[in-house]
Image (cartoon, helix red, strand yellow):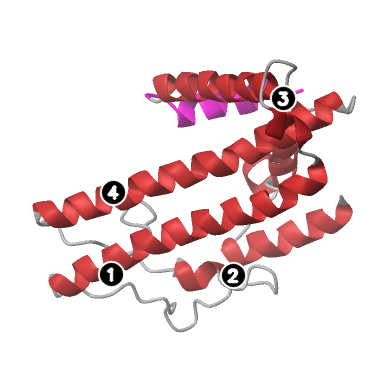
Amino acid sequence: MLIPEIVERWRAATAGREGELAAAASGFKNLLSLMSHLRSADGCPWDREQSLASLRQYIREEADEVVEAIDGVLKIEAEIRAAHNTPPADPEPPEGEDRARTDKKGHTIAHHPHRADFLAEHSAAGAPLPDVMTAEERQALDAAYAHLHKEIGDLLLQSAFLGDILVAMGRPGTDHSLELIVDKLIFRHPHVYGDREVADSAEVLVNWEALKKEE
């Protein structure tokens, strides 16, 4: 059960985005309902034939296509920077800042260096884009992001598909998976939701691995 204080902090963090959250909740409900219908008696024979085992290939495929879509955005951004003589997205962190790494998360900082001019809201790479772009450049970038949204939707479908199969097996569905991931993230962030203090993201990763072992 969520602590009211945490829920209130979430509410403050998402102030002004209430419509977006409501639409997302409604959209995910629609996706789960659609999937349930597709696998029902008057639904789709192919969807009814799928199993946890058969979906593995599609989960891998959809995840790869999300990555490819992100790569497509990065490519267009790089071309725009080059056309405007804007510095490229330097994947190397400043000297002495290459600390937030683990064997599993070795590329995290490489793509999001600890640089004052690198922010996730600037671009897909975090690096600044030119202040002014041509209409063609803006159109190409918007199209790339539209493609990314489509691929994210395809990946979300897999979670709904898996959940509906699990429900049919008499096991908890997607709602349980959502509850588990929220609980996990609260537990893995004691520096946010507890009394632990951290100096930087490197220490966050150290704590993350320790908490993972504790679980």
First to last magenta residue range: 1-16
Question: Of callouts 4 and 1, which one flags the residue occurring earlier in the amino acid sequence?
Answer: 1
Tell which tag, 3 or 4, sits nearer the viewer.
Answer: 3
Say which of marks 3 and 2 sits in front. 3
Of pointers 3 and 2, the one earlier in the residue sequence: 3
Residue 185 place in picture, x, y as percent: 69, 43
Is-magenta flag for residue 10? Answer: yes
Q: Is residue 126 visible?
A: no
Q: Which residue sits furthest right?
A: 170
Mark carried by residue 100: 2
Along the line of sight, the residue nearer the viewer: 66 or 214: 66
**Mark 3–mark 2 CB contact (< 8 Å):** no
Give the quarter of the image for residue 46: top right
The residue labelled by disc 4 is: 143
Alpha-carbon span between mark 3 and mark 2? 44 Å
How many other residues sit within 10 Å of disc 4, few (<14), some (14-19) or many (≥20)? few
- Identify which residue, 33 or 93, lies in the foreground: 33
Using the numbered discs, state the Cα–Cα distance from disc 3 to disc 4 in whole angstroms.
Answer: 33 Å
Q: Quadrant of the N terminus?
A: top right
Secondary structure under badge 1? helix
Helix, strand or loop under label 3 = loop
Name the residue carrying label 3.
39
Tell me the mark number nearer the camera, choosing from 1 and 2.
Answer: 1
Report the predominant secondary structure element of the magenta stretch: helix
Image point (59%, 20%), residue name? 29
Q: Earlier in the sequence, mark 3 or mark 1?
A: 3
Q: CA distance from mark 4 to mark 1?
A: 15 Å
